[in-house]
Amino acid sequence: MTFDPWQGSPGHLGRRQFLHALEGTVAGAIFLTVATACSSNPPAASATPAATTTATTAAATTAAAQPAATTAPANGPAIPIEIRFNGIDTNGEKVAEKWAADFGPKHNLKITTDFVDWGSSFQKITTGIAGGIAPDIFGAGGIWVPVIVSKGGAHALDSYIADYKDWSDYYPSTKKDVTWDGKVYAVPYEVDIHQTIAYRASMFQKAGISESPATWEDAQKYAKELTQLEGGDIKVAGWNVPNNQFLTQYYEDAMYQANGHIFNADRTRPTNNTPEGEAALSFLVWFVQNKTMPAAGMSAGNPSLNAFYAGNVAMAPLGPHDMENVLQYGPQVWADTKAGPVLKKVKQAQVLFVNKYMMFSKTKYPDAAWEVIQAIVQPAVNISIVVTGDLGLPVRKAMESAKLYQDPRVKEMIDNIQYAIPREMVPQSFDVQPAMSRECDAALRGAKTVKQALQDMDTAVAKILKG
């Protein structure tokens, strides 16, 4: 079983730690205020992390006080609804529990909460689906929709979406991500992207570089100028991507920038062994061949951390969780970090990762489950539980005004969402992704030529698709 970096890396900091790390900075005032940005009574920006957590809970409770119509008679037995959250931090769990305890009785619901880490979440939910005992509502990650639908575990939400006034407020790309075979199977709650170019301002200045790269050619040129060697070894990488089971995600970003696709239009055949695929993989390999990053990627000394935080990377495409990693563990690096736009080859583009809530196909109370989903994705509740502590990015316009997003580095990531394209998913995605990554790795390490790696990639993926 694999999981996306967006789906809760082990290095995610806790909400209290995250807010505490931001104290005393411009971003600190922003982040400390966000928990109650949608509340009618926000605290002063100088509130302590503990006070902010309390205010966050209050914001969630206040926001949840305006529900959809109750789905059970007020004097009847409370309807039991179980909701599973994936990968949220400890304080987020407390907020979710408090929200459930406040919201449930007001709407004749008995809401129980369950919390799992992302690493075990997929196996647990598929086991539950197979046994008919999955929670009524469960968090789902970037490539889950076709996989869960193919296992018969998802309740189609179209009849509810038809009357869901907020649906028009969601970004079209996030709505596309939760749609499969023409039906909507989930409601998004946060997104991730990996191609915001983060760079060390001091290193750029020393190298005489005045602005973020705009094109592949810029990135390659800057990477050469920024790389620092010591005894033939790379001391500071001019560029870096993590070379692991998720390497294909960076390849997919490059494929989109080259105006290509990893599958044909109906996703029945892989299309990596193409001029676009060759350009994309060659782009990744270039940085290794020109000794601006090691084939294995720069090490942070801890597999849970991004190497950028350690100060040994001058420039790299990063996502929001990478950024929080830098903030938590390398505050001096964070202070020296700036962010730029998505690179362009043929076009500016990148993969969009969407986390969402799905409803179990065999829930006994779909109307009640839908009522809970609507409440849990309200901006104030959503921000309080799953966004503030994880630096999650918005899924809809109503979330954009949160003060969390006014930090210029975070704002750049928000702006870059416009270039994001939902992942090309298939029911076999959990097998396809590592197979593609293995071939990308072989090319980066020089074990295969780019052409051979792409040929073998398509052969492996075609076999997986055929079952």
Image: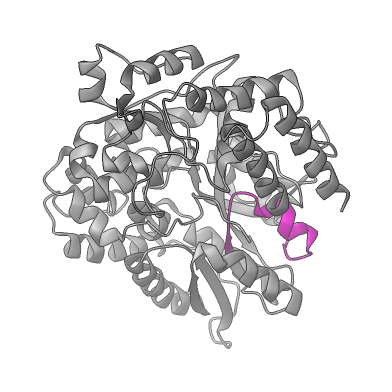
Image quadrant in which you'd find residue 218:
top left
Instruction: Look at the image and say whether residue 305 sits in the magenta stretch.
Output: no
- The span picked out in magenta is 139-155
Residue at image coords 62%, 32%: 443
Residue at image coords 72%, 72%: 129
Q: Find residue 72 and report its horizontal and vertical position in percent.
A: 60, 78
Question: Which quadrant of the rendered structure holds the N terminus?
Answer: bottom right
Most foreground residue, 213 or 22: 213
- Answer with left or right where residue 428 lies relative to residue 113: right
Residue at image coords 52%, 62%: 118
- Answer with left or right where residue 299 lies relative to residue 79: left
- Answer with left or right where residue 367 lies relative to residue 345: right
Q: Is residue 372 visible?
A: no
Question: Which quadrant of the rendered structure holds the C terminus?
Answer: bottom right
Residue at image coords 28%, 43%: 310
Question: Up-down: is 194 above or below 201?
Answer: below
Question: Up-down: is 109 above or below 137?
Answer: below
Instruction: Look at the image and say whether residue 146 sits in the magenta stretch.
Output: yes
Question: Up-down: is 32 above or below 50?
Answer: above
Image quadrant in which you'd find residue 18:
bottom left
- Answer with left or right where residue 285 lies relative to residue 205: right
Q: Is residue 374 visible?
A: yes
Q: Find residue 439 and report its horizontal and vertical position in percent.
A: 67, 39
Which residue is most to the front?
231
